[in-house]
Image: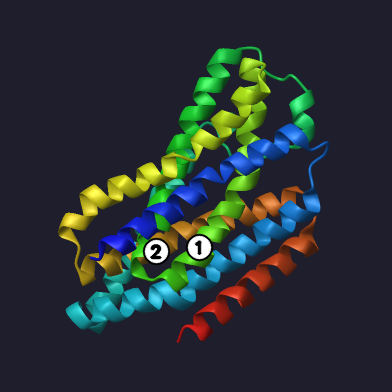
Amino acid sequence: MDNQIILIAFLLTLFAGLSTGIGGLIALIAKRTNTNFLSFALGLSAGVMIYVSFMEMLPLSNDSLTQVFGEKQGMLYLILSFFGGIASIALIDFLIPKQSNPHELQGVEDMRVVKYKSLKQTGIVTAITIAIHNFPEGIATFMSALTSLEVALPITAAIAIHNIPEGIAVSVPIYHATGSKKKAFWFSLLSGLAEPLGALIAYFFLMPFWSSTLNAVVLAAVAGVMVFISLDELLPSAEKYGKHHLSIIGLVIGMGIMAMSLYLFI
């Protein structure tokens, strides 16, 4: 595979990961949470991820697998890969304690409310759980970028937007863990490094065995990861901000943006 494509894939993953710092910055400088923006943005991200998963990534995976294994066996491998991706991200969610889960929403207002007693322990646990949770998202971004840039760019933007409220969720407990807004910002920024780390792991462990079949399996698994993230995290989070219609409008617009993007690159 072309080294330039690999480099672009790494850079896109790094950008998506470090966007948690935007959320951290918002938590430090904003006076209140912009629930309208976050509801719309989370819906938009979900729309992009769901549409590209079912309309681009799964069909590409199915074509490759059926060419190699035949229609029936190829479809079986597609199904196993898709639900395997869902199972992997669901297992990570299950293993992370609810109170430490970065997708348990926090608002900017929570920066002003001290909730934690064990300050140092809270900060360490939060940093570790963020890293674990972002790891498969980094793999998803990196592998989609290796497949095609027209697919990767909207996915990168969607995951970057998705990481903004996550950055807020990191900043709040870290601020209370350290008493320092500067540390809260840097921890929120650095927590996103788990995503390019996931890309590195994927590069070293998958690239030596890269083939069209492995690419198809990974595509289907990544589609499963993104569908789970959309249904389990993005849309429920948008609903928790109390802006149902804005999140649905964002969902439809996200699908429309992804549809036009794929259409223009035909």
Name the residue rendered at 56%, 14% in the picture: 120
Mark 1 belongs to which amino acid? Ile
Pick whichever of labels 1 and 2 is earlier in the sequence. 2
For the question of whether residue 32 can be seen, the reply is: yes
Name the residue rendered at 30%, 76% in the picture: 75
Q: Nearer the viewer, residue 76 or 24?
A: 24
**Which residue extends farthest front?**
4
Q: CA distance from mark 1 to mark 2?
A: 8 Å
Position in image of residue 159 (x %, y %)? 54, 55
The N terminus lies in quadrant: bottom left
Up-down relation of residue 134 to residue 224 (above or below) = above
Numbered tag placed on residue 144 in the rendering: 2
Position in image of residue 152 (x %, y %)? 45, 65
Position in image of residue 151 (x %, y %)? 45, 70
Helix, strand or loop under label 2: helix
Helix, strand or loop under label 1: helix
Q: Nearer the viewer, residue 105 or 183?
A: 183
Q: Quadrant of residue 76?
A: bottom left
Up-down relation of residue 5 to residue 195 (above or below) = below
Left or right: residue 211 versus residue 87 is: left
Numbered tag placed on residue 155 in the rendering: 1
Label 1 Cα neighbours within 10 Å, binned few <14 / some 14-19 / many ≥20: many
Name the residue rendered at 50%, 34% in the picture: 190
Q: Nearer the viewer, residue 93 or 157?
A: 157
Position in image of residue 84 (x %, y %)? 35, 57
> Mark 1 near mark 2, Cβ–Cβ under 8 Å?
yes
For the question of whether residue 87 can be seen, the reply is: no
Label 2 Cα neighbours within 10 Å, binned few <14 / some 14-19 / many ≥20: many
